[in-house]
């Protein structure tokens, strides 16, 4: 054990190594929790969240399986899931004290927690393209849309703002293509269809206001314990790309918004990224490169990122090399690929002469793990076989009625419940179209009043009165006149709108906002 501020992760006993602790001052050096299904990753995740919270560090995590809500309730020795831990506590020398932890529940769909939203502008074109599975050409069109919105002062807040802007770009594609490059109407149509699919999947609930205030993820309770923010993700996992994109957006917002703090005594926030393989599966190289950059730099903002996945091979090597605190549960090796992954996982640890790391990773049982945590001066500790300590909070989910009570008493209760729809791109573009229509209509009426026919100029057969009467009473003449007038007005509206837009482009050059490392806006709030 160490006398430095730390989190006790697990202990030894016969056949096991020294007690394992995570030093808080290295909590922002990131970490990995890996292992096959059913080997104990959830318990490890739970005890780490408890430890950080007790040390006054706020935590954000996604509840993929729906059982992390138990953090809000104390465990009991008689609980069926806690009974096996009594013997383990004695074996590792732990005086287990049951307690609850301050929890804030969030839910993108607003069902099991407070609604959580982002604006389209904050999401940015890179992440939105990833979410919509756009091609390179379609992503280029989306970048044009965001650039145009920045320069024209058209806030992109919700889905209808982006849809309206794409319609506007399609109607003025010639003018826009001249300035930004070819904007194909086929690409615009494809993006609109992808937006419709996202909307049908419920993804539209992510976009809008009030947007999530990052400060609400970094709260302490009255006793100084860090609040544990739990995102309900059991339903969200039906759209895994939406899940991964949202968490990546949140990570990028933290990176861009938080100040540099160097090496603090403890993290400012710890971010657990469960089902991490979803982040990197089929991700373009450009996006993976940006994630690597964020992972490398965000620790200087005091944020620790912990990836939870079944296989360490799911995490790119450049990111895996930055994960200094590791808990490796059993990794099965049934195929040649599994054996290769097992060997690679073992080679990333500092070896222990007492046992073979590869065999240990394969053979550890449920609730056991092979662990390595950073020691003084940030040196990786020698790998050890460890019995993971039992959690102090309840294993398994809490009752829905208890969750509802906790939401009512939450420090952010009522803040995000009601959607705010302020003036944005949709309203501004509609207003511009209405103004252009009125101007074109006024111009058409003025032209009609100045028509040579109305001034008594030469008319057919020289019969001014007869032509006037025929024009007034002849139904055929009126029927023919209407289509010409309607077509003329339609052309006038389009020309007026395009000319007005072209003038605005000229006057707005150089006013684009600067976008962050993953496409969201600096100071976007």
Image (cartoon, rainbow, N blue to C red):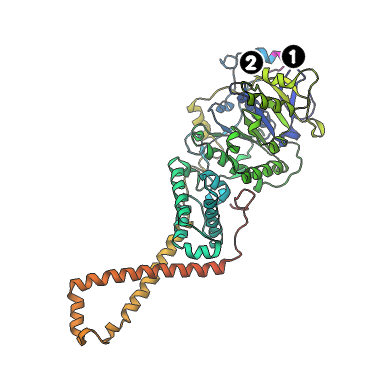
Which of the image's four quarters has the N terminus?
top right
Q: Quadrant of residue 64?
A: top right
Task: State which region is magenta.
Answer: 90-95
Q: Is residue 378 left or right of residue 46?
A: right
Q: Is residue 503 left or right of residue 520?
A: left
Q: Nearer the viewer, residue 212 or 503?
A: 503
Let me know if residue 297 appears in the view. Answer: yes
Q: Quadrant of residue 341?
A: top right
Please, which residue is most extreme toward the front here? Answer: 336
Let me know if residue 122 appears in the view. Answer: no
Q: Is residue 479 left or right of residue 206?
A: left
Relative height, residue 86 to residue 111 (above, below): above
Q: Image point 49% across, 65% down: which residue?
A: 175
Q: Look at the magenta stretch and give its main secondary structure.
A: loop
Q: Residue under circle 1?
A: 13
Q: Tag 2, which secondary structure?
A: helix
Query: Residue 73 location in percent, x, y?
Result: 57, 25
Q: Image point 45% across, 60% down: which residue?
A: 429
User: How many labels, in total?
Assistant: 2
Relative height, residue 194 to residue 46 (above, below): below
């Amino acid at each position: 054990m160490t006398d430095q501020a730390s989190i006790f992760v697990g202990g030894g006993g016969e056949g096991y190594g020294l007690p394992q602790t995570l030093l808080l001052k290295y909590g922002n050096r990131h970490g990995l929790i890996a292992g096959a299904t059913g080997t104990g990753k959830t318990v490890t995740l739970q005890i780490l969240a408890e430890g950080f919270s007790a040390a006054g560090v706020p935590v954000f995590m996604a509840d993929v399986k729906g059982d992390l809500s138990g953090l809000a309730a104390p465990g009991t020795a008689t609980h069926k899931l806690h009974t096996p831990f009594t013997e383990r506590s004695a074996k590792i020398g732990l005086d287990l004290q049951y307690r609850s932890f301050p929890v804030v529940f969030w839910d993108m769909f607003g069902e099991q927690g407070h609604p959580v939203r982002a604006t389209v502008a904050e999401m940015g074109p890179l992440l939105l393209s990833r979410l919509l599975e756009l091609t390179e050409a379609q992503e280029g069109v989306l970048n044009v849309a965001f650039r145009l919105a920045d320069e024209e002062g058209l806030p992109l807040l919700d889905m209808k703002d982006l849809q309206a802007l794409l319609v506007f770009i399609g109607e003025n594609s010639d003018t826009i293509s001249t300035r930004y490059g070819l904007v194909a109407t086929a690409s615009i149509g494809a993006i609109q269809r992808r937006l419709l699919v996202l909307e049908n999947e419920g993804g539209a609930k992510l976009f809008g206001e009030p947007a999530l205030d990052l400060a609400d993820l970094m709260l302490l309770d009255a006793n100084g314990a860090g609040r544990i923010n739990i995102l309900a993700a059991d339903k969200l996992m039906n759209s895994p790309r939406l899940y991964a994109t949202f968490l990546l957006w949140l990570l990028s917002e933290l990176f861009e918004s938080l100040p540099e703090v160097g090496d603090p005594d403890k993290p400012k926030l710890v971010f657990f990224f469960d089902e991490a393989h979803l982040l990197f599966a089929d991700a373009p190289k450009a996006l993976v490169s940006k994630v690597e950059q964020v992972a490398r730099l965000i620790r200087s903002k005091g944020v620790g990122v912990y990836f939870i996945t079944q296989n360490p091979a799911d995490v790119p090597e450049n990111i895996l090399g930055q994960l200094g605190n590791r808990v490796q549960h059993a990794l099965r090796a049934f195929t040649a690929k599994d054996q290769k992954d097992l060997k690679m996982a073992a080679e990333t640890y500092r070896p222990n002469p007492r046992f073979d790391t590869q065999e240990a990773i394969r053979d550890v049982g449920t609730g056991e793990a092979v662990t390595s945590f950073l020691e003084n001066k940030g040196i990786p500790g020698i790998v050890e076989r460890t019995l993971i300590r039992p959690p102090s909070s309840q294993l398994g989910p809490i009752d829905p009625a208890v969750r509802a009570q906790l939401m009512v008493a939450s420090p952010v209760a009522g803040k995000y419940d009601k959607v705010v729809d302020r003036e944005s791109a949709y309203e501004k573009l509609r207003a511009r179209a209405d103004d252009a229509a009125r101007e074109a209509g006024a111009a058409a009426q003025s032209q009609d009043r100045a028509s040579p026919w109305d001034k008594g100029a030469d008319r057919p057969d020289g019969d001014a009165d007869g032509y006037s009467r025929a024009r007034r009473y002849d139904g055929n003449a009126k029927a023919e006149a209407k289509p010409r007038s309607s077509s003329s007005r339609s052309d006038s509206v389009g020309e007026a709108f395009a000319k007005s837009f072209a003038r605005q482009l000229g006057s707005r050059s150089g006013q684009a906002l600067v976008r962050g490392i993953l496409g969201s806006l600096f100071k976007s709030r």
